[in-house]
Image: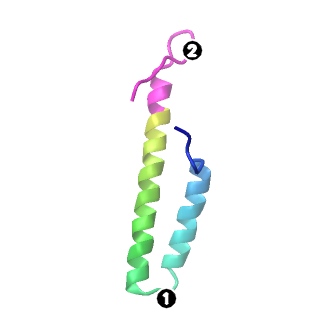
Amino acid sequence: MSKEKQEATLEETFQEMDAIIEKMQDREVTLEESFSLYEQGIKKLKYCNEKIDSVEKRMLLLNEQGELEAFDE
């Protein structure tokens, strides 16, 4: 099964989170918009945490010869 949209990199997601934070700091943003932006930010933060956890797990699986062993999630 192919993905319609390619996954964003961590760097791209961090930039998106920065943009969300900037929008939330605007005094013209309504409470409803702020809540929506907050939800978007939390989803992006969760995505980043999952990606970082995956990389950490892969690093732990490096064997003594420096080869990456398969990791089943």
Q: Residue furthest bottom?
A: 28
Q: Where is residue 72, by image quadrant?
A: top left
Number of numbered discs present? 2
Q: Residue at x 43, y 47 (%)?
A: 49
Tag 1: amino acid: Arg
Q: Residue at x 43, y 44 (%)?
A: 50
Asked which secondary structure carries label 1, the reply is loop
Q: In the rendered structure, are the residues bearing label 1 and label 2 in contact, judged by CB atoms less than 8 Å apart? A: no
Q: What stretch is highlighted in magenta?
A: 56-73
Residue 48 in the image: state x and y as whole percent: 48, 49
Residue 13 in the image: state x and y as whole percent: 56, 56
What is the image's colouring?
rainbow
Residue carrying label 1: 27
Q: Which residue is drawn at 50% across and 34% down?
A: 55
Asked which secondary structure carries label 2, the reply is loop
Going from N to C along the chain, the mark reached first, 1 or 2, is 1
Magenta span: predominant SS is: loop
Q: Which residue is drawn at 52% across and 37% down?
A: 1
- The vertical placement of 24 against 3, above or below, is below
Q: Residue furthest front?
A: 1
Foreground: 29 or 6? 6
- The vertical placement of 17 against 23, above or below, is above
Q: Distance between the residues labelled 1 and 2?
A: 52 Å
Query: Does the magenta run of residues contain 67?
Result: yes
Residue carrying label 2: 67
Q: Where is residue 40, by image quadrant?
A: bottom left
Residue 69 in the image: state x and y as whole percent: 49, 17
